[in-house]
Amino acid sequence: MIAENIQTINSTIPNTVKLIAVSKTKPFTDIQVAYDAGQRDFGENKVQELVNKTLVLPKDIRWHLIGHLQTNKVKYIAPFVHLIHAVDSIKLLKEINKQAKKYGRNINCLLQFHIAQESTKFGLSLVEAQEIVVSTEFLQLENVTICGVMGMASFVSDQAVITTEFKKLKEIFSELKSTAFSENGNFTEISMGMSGDYDAAIQAGSTMIRVGSKIFGHRNTN
């Protein structure tokens, strides 16, 4: 079922859109099945679970940390993480830079924006991001590459609300691309869209969708 789900999704999305299989709470065996079906990009929410999986699963998996990241946990994923999606402060960026330097790496990151109605979701405003990217602290970071933006739409059934929020993230991306990142050829990614709304996200300009239940079935929460 997992292999067929991946094939179905890949056959219906543009080849410009990368599928991130959200494997949080899923057993190693499920991830291996997805891997054997050709999937290489996997997303995890929790650092400890991610580290445990890297010890067991194939080494050429590209691991995406898609959940909220605390500064004291960066050191555990710095040696191997492919992309950190949810960067929402200069403090976190400085820690990622520090840990990346230790391992002689450059770590790819996305700036997370708050586009949803729920106040519980994390993320920057455009103004906050603009202040960060022109700051001396930011300009001194040598081991971090900002590759784009990430956001989560409101958890509502109203498609019009979701579409508006996705369009807002695309506008934020375009604004930053034409100003602070106009000389940065790596600033290309818009990570938005999950199992229930990725079609709308792709229409709004998403280049990366984070899909869990449509691949693995519903999440184990216990």
Image (cartoon, helix red, strand yellow):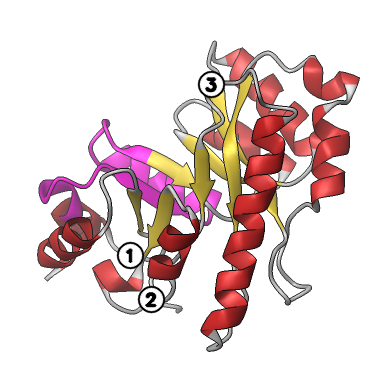
Where, by quadrant of the figure, is residue 214 drawn? Answer: bottom left
Residues at marks 3 and 2, CA–CA distance in whole angstroms: 36 Å
Residues at marks 2 and 1, CA–CA distance in whole angstroms: 7 Å
Q: Judging from the image, what secondary structure is the residue with disc 1 in?
A: loop
Is 66 within the magenta?
Answer: no
148 vs 74, nearest the viewer: 148
The residue under label 2 is: 219
Residue 68 in view: no
Which segment did they paint magenta? Answer: 34-62
The residue under label 1 is: 26
The residue under the point 38% across, 68% down is: 199
Instruction: Relative to 128, say whether 179 is above or below.
Output: above
Q: Are marks 3 and 1 in contact (CB under 8 Å)?
A: no
The residue under label 3 is: 185
Where, by quadrant of the figure, is residue 56 drawn? Answer: top left
Q: Amino acid at mark 2?
A: Arg
Horizontal relation, residue 197 to residue 148: left or right: left
88 vs 161, nearest the viewer: 161
Task: Give x and y (percent) for residue 184.
Answer: 60, 20
Q: Are marks 2 and 1 in contact (CB under 8 Å)?
A: yes
The residue under the point 75% across, 37% down is: 92
Nearer to us of marks 3 and 1 is 3
Task: Give x and y (percent) for residue 196.
Answer: 41, 76
Residue 124 in view: yes
Q: Amino acid at mark 1?
A: Lys
The residue under the point 85% across, 26% down is: 134
Q: Are marks 3 and 2 in contact (CB under 8 Å)?
A: no
The residue under the point 63% across, 14% down is: 101
